[in-house]
Amino acid sequence: MHRQAVHRGRVAYEPNSLGGGCPFQAGRMTGFTSFPEPVAEDKVRGKPEKFAEHYAQATLFWKSQTPIEQEHIIKAYRFELTRVQTQAIRERVVSMLANVDPALAQGVAAGLGIVVPAPMPLATDLPAPVYEPSPALSLRARPGDGEIKARRVALLVAHGVEADSLKAIYTALIQDDAVPRFVGVQLGVVESVSGTPIHVDITFEASPSVLYDAMVIPDGEAGIAALVGVGPALEFVRDQYRHCKPILVLGAGATLLEAAGASLDLPGGEPDLGVIVGSAADAVTTAATFKAAIAQHRHFQRFMDPPQV
C-alpha cells in the first residue's frame, strides 16, 4: 500500500477529512462536477441502486476463508492501520469492517487498542444480498498436487556438521525438483566431521529465512555449537519456525532449535507434524517424511499471535 506524504496538514487530493473540516464523504455539491458541455438532451450522472451496496461481496470473501486466512487478513489490516497517524481514520475503517463481519472488526480493533465503533451508515436501505461461502475464494481450500517442485530448502552448514546425511537429503530433494541450498555464515568451504568438504551456496546475510520454504538443521555437535553462537543463524531458525515452515532436525540439530526458542512440540503438547526429527543414520527415510511435510507448504497448527518465539 502506497502512503502519501502529509505536509502541513494537507494531503494530495481534495476533498479529504483532514482539509480544514471538509467531510470525508463528499456531498453532491462538493464532489465530482461535470464539465458544462451543452447537450441536446438532459444529462444524468447516476448509478443503479445495486451500486449503493458495498459490503456483500466483502462478506462473501471473508466467510469463504479458512480460520488461518482470516487471521492473516486481520493482521494485514492491523499492520496497515497501525501506520495511519490519525485515530479517526483508523476508527472509520473499522466502522466499515463492522458492516462486513463483527469478528473481523473485533479482531482489527483489538489489535489497534480501540473499541469497535458503530457500523458506518449504509448507503441504501435495501436488504443486502446473502451469498453462500465459496471454497474457490480460499487458497487453503486448494490442497495442491503433492509435489515440491521449485520449493526452496535451506540446509544449514558450519565446520563440524555431519555431511553424508546432508548430501543424501540434498539428493532426495533434487530428485523431486526442489531447490536445496547450503546456507552458512560465509562463502567458501566448510569441513564436515568426516573431512568431506561442503561448498556454501549462500550466506545468512545475503539470503534470509523468508526466501525459503523449508529448512534442514544438520547433525554434528561441533557444527551445531558453531551455529548456536551465530546470531543470524538463530534468527534464521526462529523465523522459519514463526512462519510455520517445515523443519527437518537431525541428531544434535535439536540443540540449535532449542537455542532459537523453538520447540519440537506444539504449545498444547501435541507433536508438531511440521518439525521432522531424525538421525543421520536414517536420513533417506527421514527425507521422504520431510518432503511430504514440504508438500503441505505451511503447518499453521504452530501459528501464534503474537508469536511466543
Image (spheres, rainbow, N blue to C red):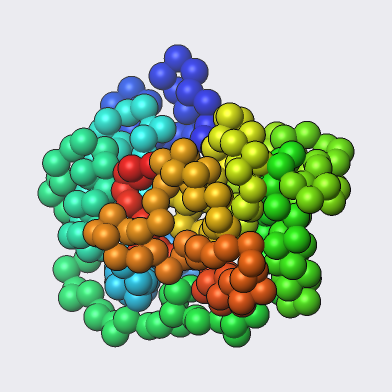
Residue closer to the observer: 261 or 88: 261
Q: Is residue 7 above or below residue 145?
A: above
Q: Quadrant of residue 268?
A: bottom left
Q: Provide residue 307's location: percent of width, then percent of height.
A: 35, 45
Q: Provide residue 288's location: percent of width, then percent of height.
A: 61, 77
Residue closer to the observer: 71 or 267: 267
Q: Residue at x 63, y 53 (%)?
A: 218
Residue closer to the observer: 289 or 236: 289
Q: Residue at x 64, y 67 (%)?
A: 281
Q: Residue at x 56, y 50 (%)?
A: 253
Q: Provide residue 169's location: percent of width, then percent of height.
A: 70, 66
Q: Is residue 38 above or below residue 206?
A: below
- Asked whether, in this view, residue 214 is left or right of residue 101, the answer is right
Q: Residue at x 50, y 65 (%)?
A: 276
- Asked whether, in this view, residue 289 is left or right of residue 44, the answer is right
Residue 193 visible to the viewer:
yes
Quadrant showing the C terminus: top left
Q: Provide residue 72's location: percent of width, then percent of height.
A: 39, 56
